[in-house]
Image (spheres, rainbow, N blue to C red):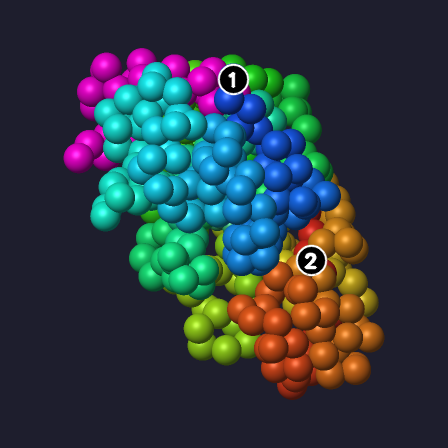
């Protein structure tokens, strides 16, 4: 079977480019996903995809009685569809294309997706599946350590703080994952580069650029070690920060907020990228001895040359932990720093034992 991300074949490129229009015509859109899964908006679904997959058994009929429903079942809920329903609902142009580029697999009369597809801002993004829904209704989470995440609510929160900066011709999306940030902003720049340390993410980002007909280049590089800029650029980075309150949370690919910020700012405080601008989403643990997250960040950046720093805290972000929660000994069970909602006390205890006053999700903007 072909790999959907194998871009060497020029015929495959034209097939990938045909996909968005077909999907849009079927009404496989962000709005339709929210409506079908009874969510206030698609950001809610992206932030809580496993919960929406588990709690939407009651819309089972809708997931087989229309083409958009089948797409949601396969590529958003990561469930399966009986071959019979699949062929009833899928227009031949889509089922042929899906077979050709390897989007689905078939087993014992059932069709499953091989990856996720997320519609956002009129574009489509391939990524890995975080989990699959089993015939029993339970979820099996992916164990691959190079998993390329679907766009997340953190991607959308960062995007809300980002706008095209017309002082720069070049955009660099660091830690691009499936490329959602860079591809959402690319039309405002003469050039867009999508960078990730994971070669698998680079392949997804490149495939998504091709599928959405966006001229962006993707390359594998490590923001902590490699020089990424050859001109001053607008750098955006949804950094993989977390709070390692138990050993399983410190997954591969995670970094501290300090490493994320100093690495991004290092790109524009010297060398050919000097004078660029970085906007970085990080989750910052603020110790008692610092008056604010901004004071802590200024301390981290004290040995870098930069002209301006703006810190925009995101008080409504589901990554936030307030000082009251830490003092009360339990965080909001929906906090996205938790692996399981039953860890709410463990996280508060961990933060208290480290002398953390609060956890502040924020976007730091730094001009080099
Ligand atoms: C939170 S995800 C963000 C993905 C995507 N930008 C988004 O907003 O949905 C963080 C990404 O950073 C990448 N990453 C981790 N360490 C990195 C490093 N040292 N250099 C570049 N990318 C890195 C990970 O592979 C992952 O794709």
Coordinates of residue 256 in the picture (x, y in percent): 53, 62
Coordinates of residue 108 in the picture (x, y in percent): 23, 48
Q: In this view, does 135 lie above or below 81?
A: below
Pick whichever of labels 2 and 1 is earlier in the sequence: 1
Q: Name the residue under label 2.
A: 318
Residues drawn in magenta: 1-24
Coordinates of residue 101 in the picture (x, y in percent): 26, 27
- Residue at figure coordinates x 34%, y 61% from the top left: 143
What secondary structure do most residues of the magenta stretch adopt?
A: helix
Nearest to the observer: residue 62 or residue 230: 62
Crowd band around label 2 with a 10 angstrom C-alpha radius: few (<14), some (14–19), many (20+) = some
Nearest to the observer: residue 62 or residue 106: 62
Q: Is residue 2 magenta?
A: yes
What quarter of the picture does the C terminus occupy? Answer: top right
- Residue at figure coordinates x 60%, y 77% from the top left: 343
Q: Name the residue under label 1.
A: 25
- Residue at figure coordinates x 53%, y 58% from the top left: 54
């Amino acid at each position: 079977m072909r790999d959907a991300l194998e871009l060497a074949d020029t015929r495959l490129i034209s097939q990938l480019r045909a996909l968005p229009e077909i999907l849009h015509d079927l009404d496989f859109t962000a709005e339709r996903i929210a409506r079908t899964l009874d969510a206030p908006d698609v950001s809610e679904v992206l932030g809580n995809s496993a919960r929406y997959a588990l709690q939407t058994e009651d819309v089972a009929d809708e997931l087989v009685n229309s083409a958009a429903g089948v797409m949601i079942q396969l590529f958003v809920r990561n469930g399966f569809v009986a071959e019979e329903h699949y062929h009833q609902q899928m227009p031949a142009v889509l089922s042929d294309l899906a077979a050709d580029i390897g989007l689905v697999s078939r087993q014992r009369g059932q069709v499953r997706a091989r990856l996720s597809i997320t519609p956002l801002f009129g574009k489509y993004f391939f990524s890995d599946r975080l989990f699959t829904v089993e015939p029993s209704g339970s979820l099996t989470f992916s164990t691959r350590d190079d998993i390329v995440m679907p766009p997340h609510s953190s991607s959308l929160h960062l995007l809300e703080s980002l706008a095209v900066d017309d002082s720069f011709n070049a955009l660099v999306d660091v830690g691009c994952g499936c490329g959602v940030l860079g591809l959402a902003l690319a039309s405002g720049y003469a050039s867009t580069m999508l960078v990730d340390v994971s070669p698998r993410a680079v392949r997804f980002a490149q495939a998504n650029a091709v599928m959405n007909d966006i001229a962006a280049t993707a390359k594998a590089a490590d923001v902590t070690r490699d020089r990424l800029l050859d001109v001053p650029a607008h750098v955006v980075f949804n950094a993989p920060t977390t709070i390692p309150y138990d050993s399983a949370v410190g997954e591969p690919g995670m970094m501290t907020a300090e490493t994320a910020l100093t690495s991004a700012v290092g790109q524009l405080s010297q060398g050919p990228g000097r004078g660029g601008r970085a906007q970085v989403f990080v989750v910052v643990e603020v110790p008692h001895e610092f008056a604010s997250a901004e004071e802590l960040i200024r301390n981290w950046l004290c040995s870098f040359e930069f002209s301006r720093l703006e810190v925009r805290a995101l008080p409504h972000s589901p990554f936030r932990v307030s000082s009251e929660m830490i003092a009360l000994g339990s965080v909001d069970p929906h906090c996205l720093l938790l692996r399981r909602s039953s860890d709410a006390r463990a996280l508060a205890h961990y933060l208290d034992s480290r002398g953390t006053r609060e956890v502040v999700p924020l976007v730091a903007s730094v001009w080099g």
